[in-house]
Image: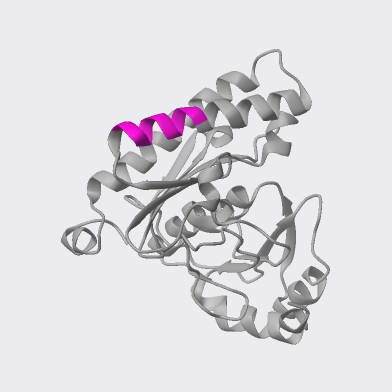
Amino acid sequence: MAAGTDGKARGYSTSDHEAAADLARQAGVLLAELQLGDLEGKELGAEGDRRSHDLLIGLLAERYPDDRVRSEEDTQSEALVTDAGRVWIIDPLDGTREYSERRSDWAVHVALSVNGDAAVGAVALPGLDLVLCTGTPPPLPAPPATPRMVVSRTRPPEFVPFVAERLGAEIVPMGSAGAKISAVVRGEAEVYVHAGGQYEWDSCAPVAVALAAGLHACRIDGSPLRYAQPDPWLPDLIVCHPSLAEAVLAAVRDSGLLEKG
């Protein structure tokens, strides 16, 4: 939902959308410049994680000193007692492996959870020179006759072939969670199903953008996604075109995935 009077009443405003986009963009620029340097492999990934985290934490402290922050790269990730109020949830570098391999399918996530909802979010995709954000979400495209389902390029889950066959979907391998959800947001895919384990920072920002764009997002059992929980573990989710939501949930149910969970 784009910000406005209603958004402000819910605990966030237009300035929060703008801030999320600005912070994600700044971190993306920093990481893109570092990726062009002399560091290699795991050293490059570790340095990217550290520098982006330090930048985002510093900027959030300046702009929102009273807000809580949960980051993948910080022990604050374990410090939440309640989801009430405002909590910034950030992934300074989503797709560290792809980044360290000098690929382009990585992202920066900056999100604001308000009372447990993914209310504000921005996903920087420096490889595409793009920032997707809740302040100006992209229009919802019409799905093609053959839906496309994005999956992990290195660890595709066992249920993927069954769900893809049920949907008549083409499988598209891709890197980070942010890149995969962003592909659905941008209309380059229609379905993303994950059940192999993630944390809140892996999905909060792209889910916020997806919801703002009119996409469907939920847990694999159809229940709402909730953030800023005491435990940051969020093992599964679905993001898809709303016209496919019932079919995706049915395919997941028939795959036996819910019983395995």
Rendered location of residue 189, percent (x, y): 61, 59
Q: Is residue 214 left or right of residue 48?
A: left
Q: Is residue 187 visible?
A: no
Residue at 59 percent of width and 28 percent of height: 50
Residue at 73 percent of width and 23 percent of height: 43
Residue at 57 percent of width and 44 percent of height: 72
Q: Is residue 95 left or right of residue 18?
A: right
Rendered location of residue 192, percent (x, y): 63, 64
Q: Is residue 6 visible?
A: yes
Vertically, is 259 above or below 35? below
Give the quarter of the figure containing the C terminus. Answer: bottom right
Q: Magenta part of the protein: which range?
A: 54-62
Q: Tally the numbered discs.
A: 0
Residue at 43 percent of width and 56 percent of height: 209
- Secondary structure of the magenta portion, mostly? helix
- Residue nearer the viewer, 49 or 173: 49
Indicate yes or no whether the magenta region holds residue 137.
no
Indicate yes or no whether the magenta region holds residue 55.
yes
Rendered location of residue 238, percent (x, y): 59, 69
Q: Residue 31, located in which quarter of the rendered image?
A: top right
* Colour scheme in use: one colour
- Residue nearer the viewer, 117 or 206: 117
Q: Residue 4, located in which quarter of the rendered image?
A: bottom left
- Residue nearer the viewer, 135 or 141: 135
Rendered location of residue 152, percent (x, y): 74, 54
